[in-house]
Image (tube, helix red, strand yellow):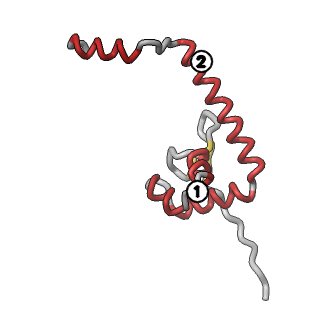
Amino acid sequence: MAVAELTEIIPLHTDKDGVFRVGRTRVTLDTIVGAFKEGATAEEIAYQYPTVSLADIYSVISYYLRQKTEVDAYLKRREKFSEEIRKQNESRFDATGIRERLLARRESGKN
């Protein structure tokens, strides 16, 4: 019995910023893998992100499990980049007293 070799295309594409997105959606690889690592099933992820097909979620999880080292390295780089951006934003904007300022603005009737 001959066994046909099957090549499956992983439903991931890279956007202009180098972020992996799933299928034709804006949902990131980070999001799917993060939910999976937190214990969500593929069905739960599909319910939470209805723009991603269940088949694509299974494919992405399968890809993650087969390429765990590479995907984890990518996720680590994304996490480091996010932290750098957060620090830059915090250094540009002083959030001290923001709650009080917003409440005072609301009370004065200014939008």
Where does the image place residue 38, in percent across and percent down from the top left? 59, 52
Residue at 71 percent across and 58 percent down: it is 65
Where does the image place residue 5, in percent across and percent down from the top left? 75, 73
Disc 2 secondary structure class: helix
Task: State the image quarter where residue 36 is shown.
Answer: bottom right
Residue at 60 percent across and 48 percent down: it is 34
| Amino acid under disc 1 | Gly
Determine crowd level at label 2: few under 14, some 14-19, many 20+ residues with C-alpha closer than 10 A.
Answer: few
| Amino acid under disc 2 | Gln
Q: Quadrant of the N terminus?
A: bottom right
Determine crowd level at label 1: few under 14, some 14-19, many 20+ residues with C-alpha closer than 10 A.
Answer: few
- The single residue placed furthest to the left in the displayed view is 109
Position of 22 with respect to 51 (left or right) is right
Residue at 40 percent across and 15 percent down: it is 98
The residues tagged by marks 1 and 2 sit, at their Cα atoms, a distance apart of 32 Å
Position of 46 with respect to 38 (left or right) is left
Where does the image place residue 74, in percent across and percent down from the top left? 71, 41
Position of 108 with respect to 87 (left or right) is left
Between residue 54 and residue 44, name the one nearer to us. Answer: 44
Q: In this view, does 1 lie above or below 55?
A: below
Between residue 17 and residue 72, name the one nearer to us. Answer: 72
The label number, if any, that marks residue 64 in the structure image: none
Q: In this view, does 27 lie above or below 56?
A: above
Q: Name the residue under label 2.
A: 88
Q: In which quarter of the image is the C terminus?
A: top left
Q: In this view, does 55 lie above or below 87?
A: below
Task: State the image quarter where residue 15 is shown.
Answer: top right
Task: State the image quarter where residue 106 is shown.
Answer: top left
Q: Of marks 1 and 2, which one's residue comes earlier in the chain?
A: 1
The label number, if any, that marks residue 39 in the structure image: 1
